[in-house]
Amino acid sequence: MNEKTKTSEDCSRRQFFTHISYTLGGLAALMVGIPIVGSVLAPIVKQPKPIWRPVGELKTFTVGDIVKVSFIDSSPLPWAGVTAETAAWLHRKGEEEFTCFSVNCAHLGCPVRWVAGARLFMCPCHGGVYYEDGTVAAGPPPRGLYDYPVRINNGQVEILTSPIPITTV
Amino acid sequence: MESLKRAWLWFDDRTGLGSALGPVIKHPVPPNSASWFYVFGSATLFAFMLQVATGVALAFMYVPSAGEAYQSLQYITDQTTFGRIVRGMHNWGASAMILLIGVHMVRVYLTAAYKFPREMHWISGVVLWALVVIMAFSGQVIRWDQTAVWSTIVASEQAGRIPFIGEWVAQFLIGGGTIGGATLSRMFAYHVFIVPALLFIFIGLHLYLVIKNGISEFPKAGKPVNPETYREEYEALVKKKGIPFWPDAAWRDMVFGFIVITTILLIALIIGPPALGPPPNPANIDALPVPDWYFVFYFAFLALMPPQMETYLMVFGPLLVGALLFFLPFISNKGERSPLRRPWAVAIVALTIASISGLWAIGITSPWSPHFDAKPLTVEIIGADSGPIYRGGMDFNEKGCLYCHTISGQGGLRGPDLTYIGDRLSPDELTWRIMNGGLNMPGFGGTLTNAELADLVVFLKSRTKQNQEASSLGGD
């Protein structure tokens, strides 16, 4: 066996060991990486089912009034505590006609307040203002308030929960 | 003493640590780098070490559970031994890190220490700066009070504006569709595991590079960096005139570091940690989520940017700033280093500091926010206790006008001061403006009765300088 052949064989063995080391390392990382990364990314893939939540008896809401209602969000975890709660602005427009707005400003999600005297929703963060029908009255919001579906079920007003509305482009 | 020395000699013989690290910490540095201008990087590192120590101590007491974190913070602050001080040091240490890393970056930029061969020092430093900002934000969130909850939502909404993947990024941040059990656990993981791990890696890289390429010499005007000759010149300089880093240069770092750490401790002792806000209940909407001081300028920027451009500014603005900082050494890595020969660099720093300071000052007052806690106008200010002026004044209080307009020093700052509006607008003009709104004011045509509108106009028309002076004379 001459010197040249020896070197070539060495290189070939070395290349094999290099490739097998990289391959095995990569394979091991991939095998454990799938469940690790998958568990971290799961919340954006697995969406909770919307749930109808009761927010009060029909008779407790006065026609014309806009009131804040609180309820449990769509995906409460056992350790969520008070963070499982959420709120919405419920407007009884007629005997059986309701509108329900998200409390999140369509600008950057801050909690809008209902100013009954002015009949306006006002956001404390960046000055977004909405009329009582949810349309933009002033300030930076790019759209009106988001709304939730409402229904009356056995004398109870119910709201269909949904994720925090994210304004996208 | 003798036995300790013997123990150390044995340890050093078996590990080689002394002989390995000794030359590193005593490596020669340019004599003019032993300056008070060069202490901010090490001070940032000292502040980081304090953050690690206080963070670990807090982790012994903090419960990273959405339903219990708030109570555990109350417990740390009010009931544990030294917990208040540790929380205070962790909070003010974060402020110190933000401040010191900013000053360090300004010093490096002004003295152009990012130029050849230290481009990677700057790039690793920019990554560290970004990581420190993420730590500051995630730290504010795991304080887990009402402001934390709403700050998370605001951050998610900003992420939501990223084209195509915005909603996914937003949901990744909050751990699903709603704020809740998953949100705090994720923020805790970012704050305690992921970002600190990256910080350790990049601090290691940053320090390794400082040893490899040496501390930059203080620049001299008229002595530009030439990549072809710089390394030889630098080596010749430190060989001929260099002084050992330890202790000849490092003593200043130790003195300044001591001052920084002592200041943080004193502030923690005297002022203590920031008070916790109300509990993190997303159904409690009486909130004004103003961020910690170092993000207030950005809070103002979000409020003041033109609505037509805000999506681009919100998403691409930070990306552009980050990219400019990151690629700075590739824009210019040779030539003059002295700030005396780089007026644009000085101007950029001055403009940046002025912009941030200006936005910060505006952000503190937040004039765009309605003042929900404005004190109602009194009968004395209204100037009547019956009749249309009085009724108009009461309407001004009750219809929300006061939240945005000031009269006689009371009210919000969002709209114009109406103390002397009667001198500027006629009744017709007042009526038109109230009915239709304008600029940033909603129209009230659909909400006011004719009588309320008439009273409001009479009240506003009575807001004249003459009336105010007469009223104050009458008061005397």
Image: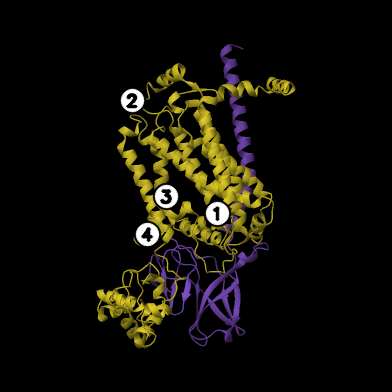
Chain colours: A purple, B yellow
Q: Nearer the viewer, mark 3 or mark 1?
A: 1
Q: Counting other residues with Cα less than 10 Å from the Cα at mark 3, is it few (<14), some (14-19), or many (20 or more)?
A: few
Residue sitting nearer the eye, A15 or A93: A93
Q: Residues within 10 Å of mark 2 (few under 14, many from 20)?
A: few
User: In the image, B135: left or right of B409?
Assistant: right
Q: Amino acid at mark 3?
A: Pro
Quadrant of residue B116 in the image? Answer: top left
Check whether the beta carbons of the residues at disc 3 and disc 1 lie within 8 A of each other. no
Residue holding disc 3: B318
- The answer for how far apart the CA atoms under marks 1 and 2 are is 45 Å
Q: Chain of mark 4?
A: B
Report whether mark 3 lies on the same chain as mark 2. yes
Q: Which mark is residue B304?
A: 4
Task: Give the number of the disc on residue B140.
Answer: 1
The residue positioned farthest toward the front in the image shown: B476
Determine crowd level at label 4: few under 14, some 14-19, many 20+ residues with C-alpha closer than 10 A: some
Q: Do discs 1 and 4 share a chain?
A: yes
Observer-side mark, 3 or 2, equals 2
Quarter of the rendering containing residue B458: bottom left
